[in-house]
Image: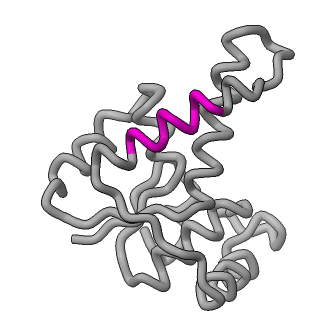
């Protein structure tokens, strides 16, 4: 099986969010499979990790360049450790992301309420024709569930 991994799944595992065990188990069950992420997934995951680190420093704290660097290293190590392949965002994926926003997006008021990053994760999985590994209740309201 080939999986496209959303930032929500990566962050859940690295920060041990509630429910991370199920996501980890799905990855473990698929060890011999191929995993993909995109540059946008990496970006989103880095920002989420850095924000969480800043919040532990204080409720109003903003991520520092050092925190961003540490988060980048953690995401890169996760990707490297699982031999995850990074795909290129093509024109086809860009068009599929616009379609996702028009169909399932927050902007159109769909119950899935996909945001920018979600639309691109959806589009990557859709264009690749693979399953999407994610955490949360947004993608369950799409045709990828």
Residue at x 47% of width, y 72% of height: 87
Q: Quadrant of residue 91?
A: bottom right
Q: Is residue 33 visible?
A: yes
Instruction: Report whether 34 appears left or right of 115.
Output: left
Residue at x 60% of width, y 84% of height: 90
Q: From the image, give the main secondary structure of the stretch colored magenta.
A: helix
Number of marks drawn? 0
Residue at x 64% of width, y 37% of height: 48
Instruction: Report whether 13 appears left or right of 53.
Output: left
Task: Tell me if residue 101 comes above or below residue 133 in the rendering.
Answer: below
* Scheme by which the image is coloured: one colour
Asked whether 71 or 54 is in front, the reply is 71
Task: Tell me if residue 36 comes above or below residue 14 in the rendering.
Answer: below
Residue at x 69% of width, y 24% of height: 66
User: Residue 97 appears at what percent x and percent y?
Assistant: 66, 78
Magenta range: 69-78
Asked whether 141 or 114 is in front, the reply is 114
Q: The C terminus lies in which quarter of the figure?
A: bottom left
Q: Is residue 137 magenta?
A: no
């Amino acid at each position: 099986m080939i999986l496209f991994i959303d930032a929500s799944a990566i962050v859940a595992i690295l920060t041990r969010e509630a429910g991370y065990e199920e996501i980890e188990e799905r990855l473990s069950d698929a060890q011999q499979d191929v995993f993909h992420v995109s540059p946008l997934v990496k970006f989103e995951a880095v920002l989420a990790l850095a924000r969480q680190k800043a919040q532990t420093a204080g409720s109003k704290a903003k991520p520092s360049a050092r925190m961003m660097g540490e988060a980048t290293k953690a995401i890169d190590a996760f990707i490297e450790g699982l031999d995850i392949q990074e795909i290129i965002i093509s024109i086809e994926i860009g068009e599929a992301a616009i379609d996702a926003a028009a169909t399932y997006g927050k902007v159109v008021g769909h119950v899935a309420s996909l945001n920018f990053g979600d639309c691109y994760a959806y589009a990557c999985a859709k264009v690749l024709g693979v399953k999407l590994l994610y955490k949360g209740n947004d993608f369950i309201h799409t045709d990828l569930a």
